[in-house]
Image (cartoon, helix red, strand yellow):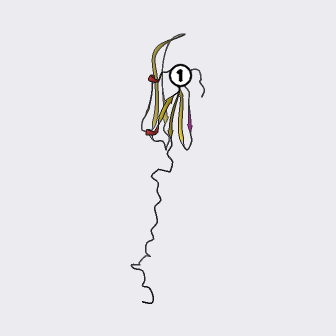
Amino acid sequence: MDRELGKLVSAIKEDDKSFQVMVDVTDFEPDEIMVKTTDKDIIVHAKHDERKDPNGSISREFRRRITIPPGVKQESITSTMSPEGLLTIMAPKTTSEGSSERVIPITMAPAVGAINPPPAKGN
């Protein structure tokens, strides 16, 4: 993940087992960041009021919206912030195991027009 001219840059990693988003939030304190989900998105919102810096003062705000990929359940999404200011949002993807997929057995029906099987010979 690169930092380009002071802009917050994010990286997204996705494979068949997991989904991960990393966002550089070094300019924000944990209580200035909110991560939430909507029906189809993860939203990262960070804001801090004006504060002094070596060149005067600055205020910052950003909002990042990421589409939740298929196979990710909202209730499984977690977020962690490192001491270095890297926010990582993760979620496992569901697999076909444990899903609603099931095998339906095939039952053989009697032949068309047959009501009862023919009587056995020799009776």
Image quadrant where one finds the C terminus = bottom left
Taking the magenta stretch, the answer to whether it contains residue 65 is no
**Can you give x and y, in whole percent of width and height, for residue 64 in the image?**
49, 29
* 83 is higher (above) or lower (below) than 113: above
Q: Nearer the viewer, residue 62 or 77?
A: 77
Q: Residue lying farthest left? A: 115
Q: Nearer the viewer, residue 119 or 63?
A: 119
Image quadrant where one finds the N terminus = top right
**Can you give x and y, in whole percent of width and height, for residue 63 in the image?**
47, 27
Q: Is residue 1 left or right of residue 94?
A: right
Residue neighbourhood size for the residue with mark 1, other residues' Cα within 10 Å, grouped as few (<14), some (14–19), many (≥20): some
**First to last magenta residue range:** 11-15
On the image, numbered disc 1 is attached to which residue?
Answer: 26
**Chief SS of the magenta region:** strand
* 97 is higher (above) or lower (below) than 106: above
Q: Residue at x 56, y 27 (%)?
A: 9
Q: Secondary structure at mark 1?
A: loop
**Can you give x and y, in whole percent of width and height, for residue 16 in the image?**
55, 44
Q: Residue lying farthest front? A: 83
Q: Residue at x 49, y 34 (%)?
A: 66
Q: Residue at x 46, y 36 (%)?
A: 41
Taking the magenta stretch, the answer to whether it contains residue 14 is yes
